[in-house]
Amino acid sequence: MEKIDKKQIFIHKKNLINNYNIIREKSGNSEIMSVIKGDAYGHGIQECMDVLKKSGCRHFYVARLEDAIDLRKKHKDNTDIYLLSGTTSTETCKLLNKFKITPIINNLSQLEIITKYSDSINIILHFDTGMNRLGFKFSEINLIKGMINLNNIKFLMTHLSSADEKNLKECRSQLSEIKKINHFFKKPLSIANSSGIFLGKAFHLNYV
């Protein structure tokens, strides 16, 4: 038998649809945000978005501005595309505005850039409640409120640090923290990553 040197990976779209339907069933009335960064983790960003859209998903996270723009050029309807890396310059803000991409704002520097560019671009505020990687701190809330039109905040998000380890004590602490933060904003919330969805309804909130 002839030896085949080239390695191949076969992606089964039916399995992706099945996985999405499992998440939809688990997450109840919460909106599902599909993370398709890194070329959908190597599965093909355009292909995965097409499949997920047909399954009912309308919210997509990407990490690179180039990916967000490429997706928007193909999907010009009411699909929401979110940029996890936020913004770094006025030029980036112009592109976000032009292609209707919603940035995740992770720190005061990014917030200053976006507010100086425009007071009408919708954003998501990312708070650090225990991941200790990205996001605003509780102590920065007053600074944030002094810089921004609160009507432009679509929702608040945070990231569970131990959901895959089923560390419920830590997860519940983060859930309590983001709710405490939201007393100052009164916005929809997102905390559940993939593993967090399986922790139960209390973690589903508005977006998963």
Image (cartoon, rainbow, N blue to C red):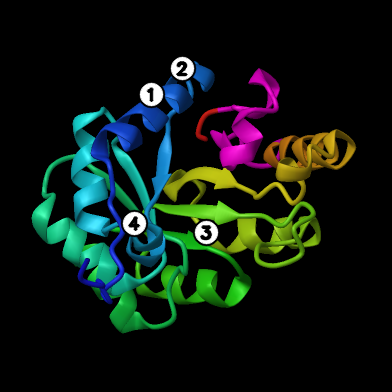
Mark 1: which amino acid?
Asn
Residues at circles 2 and 3 in contact by the CB criterion of under 8 Å: no
What secondary structure is the magenta-colored segment mainly?
loop
Q: Earlier in the sequence, mark 1 or mark 3?
A: 1
Label 2, secondary structure: give it. Answer: helix
> Residue at point 36% right, 63% down?
42
Q: Outermost residue toward the right?
A: 169
Q: Which residue is mark 2?
A: 25
Q: Which residues are magenta?
A: 183-205
Residue 118, quarter of the rendered image: bottom left
> Residue at point 26% right, 48% down?
48
Q: Which residue is mark 3?
A: 148
Asked whether the viewer can see residue 146, the reply is yes
Query: Residue 128, image x and y in percent?
Result: 72, 57
Q: Which residue is mark 1?
A: 21
Query: Residue 129, image x and y in percent?
Result: 76, 52
Residue 67, quarter of the rendered image: bottom left
Residues at circles 1 and 3 in contact by the CB criterion of under 8 Å: no
Q: In this view of the protein, which residue sits in the foreground, 203 or 126?
A: 203
**Separation of disc 4 and disc 3 at Cα?**
10 Å
Q: Earlier in the sequence, mark 2 or mark 3?
A: 2
**Separation of disc 2 and disc 1 at Cα?**
6 Å
Mark 2: which amino acid?
Glu
> Residue at point 77% right, 64% down?
132
Mark 4 vs mark 2: give the one in front.
Answer: 2
Q: Which residue is mark 4?
A: 120
Direction from residue 68 to residue 189 in the image, left or right: right
**Separation of disc 1 and disc 4 at Cα?**
35 Å
Q: Earlier in the sequence, mark 1 or mark 4?
A: 1
- Residue 194 is inside the magenta segment: yes
